[in-house]
Image (spheres, rainbow, N blue to C red):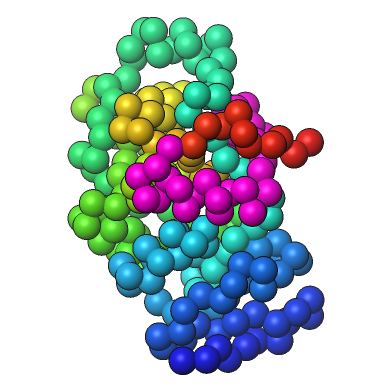
């Protein structure tokens, strides 16, 4: 099935309604950065196909599904994880109990209700919650959770395909809870052979953990290797200032 297109001010974007595949990444817009397609659904096959090609959904309630592949791409190589001295002290105290995959729906639901600077609403709609819970049940999504006195107080979640992990969102109700969950998740993924964590867009918070930007071409090259259970040496990844 051939693509239809939406004409936007800065270029045209493919419509992927029905059985249309995603277009080539070279067709992604530069403004807004990485918008590559509109439409489709959040079915398990569609989401897995998207992630395998370096594409992810990001849209607000009431909008059509928007698909993105920005360039450059923020990533974290597990061996480059940076932990601040203050967080090291928190980890040493073992204040939180860390669990994995014991409350996936609760984590993503909590992420959906977390207000973020500069955002009036959330992109984690009920459809997103249901779709990623389906990914979790199929073994492709996981959560890391920080518990305090038997209560879930922080966590994060993402998608894992082969040795590639795609971070999605995090939340906290207690200081450092999400950071503890995140650091624990990175160590957990490292033990499982994960070679790169996709952080999608650049933020100062992620940079503080050692995440850095690489160009999309390199990102896709590494992703293709890792999705097929390969390995990658991060020393080969050129940093973009």
Q: Pick whichever, 28 or 235, lies toward us.
A: 235
Inspect this view and state whether residue 115 appears: no
**Which residue is located at x 79 percent, y 76 percent?**
10
Q: Is residue 1 toward the left or the right of residue 143 in the image? A: right
**Which residue is located at x 38 percent, y 71 percent?**
46
Examine the structure image and report whether residue 224 is included in the region drawn in magenta. Answer: yes
Q: Is residue 71 toward the left or the right of residue 80 in the image? A: right
Residue 151: where, in percent of width, then height?
26, 31
Q: Quadrant of residue 59?
A: bottom right
Provide the major secondary structure of the magenta segment.
helix
Q: Is residue 214 toward the left or the right of residue 130 in the image? A: right
Inspect this view and state whether residue 241 appears: yes
Q: How many numbered marks are there?
A: 0
Compared with residue 64, is residue 73 higher up or lower down, i.e. above or below?
above
**Which residue is located at x 21 percent, y 27 percent?**
150
Residue 117: where, in percent of width, then height?
63, 45
Residue 34: where, in percent of width, then height?
66, 63
The span picked out in magenta is 204-231
Q: Pick whichever, 9 or 149, lies toward us.
A: 9
Report the quarter where the C terminus lies.
Answer: top right
Examine the structure image and report whether residue 189 is included in the region drawn in magenta. Answer: no
**Which residue is located at x 62 percent, y 48 percent?**
218
């Amino acid at each position: 099935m051939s693509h239809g297109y939406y004409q936007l001010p800065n270029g045209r974007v493919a419509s992927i309604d029905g059985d249309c595949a995603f277009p080539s990444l070279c067709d992604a817009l530069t403004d807004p950065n990485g918008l590559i397609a509109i439409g489709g659904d959040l079915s398990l096959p569609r989401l897995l196909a998207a992630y395998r090609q370096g594409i992810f959904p990001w849209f607000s309630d009431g909008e059509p599904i928007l698909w993105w592949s920005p360039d450059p791409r923020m990533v974290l190589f597990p061996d480059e994880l940076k932990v601040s001295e203050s967080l090291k002290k928190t980890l040493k105290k073992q204040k939180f109990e860390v669990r994995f995959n014991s409350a996936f729906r609760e984590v993503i639901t909590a992420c959906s209700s977390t207000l973020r600077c500069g955002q009036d609403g959330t992109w984690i709609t009920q459809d997103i919650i249901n779709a990623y819970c389906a990914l979790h049940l199929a073994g492709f999504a996981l959560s890391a959770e920080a518990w305090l006195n038997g209560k879930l107080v922080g966590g994060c979640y993402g998608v894992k395909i082969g040795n590639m992990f795609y971070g999605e969102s995090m939340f906290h109700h207690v200081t450092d809870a999400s950071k503890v969950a995140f650091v624990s998740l990175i160590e957990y993924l490292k033990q499982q052979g994960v070679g790169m964590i996709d952080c999608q867009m650049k933020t100062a918070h992620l940079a503080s953990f050692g995440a850095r930007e690489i160009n999309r071409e390199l990102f896709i090259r590494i992703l293709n290797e890792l999705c097929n259970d390969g390995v990658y040496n991060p020393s080969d990844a050129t940093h973009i200032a």
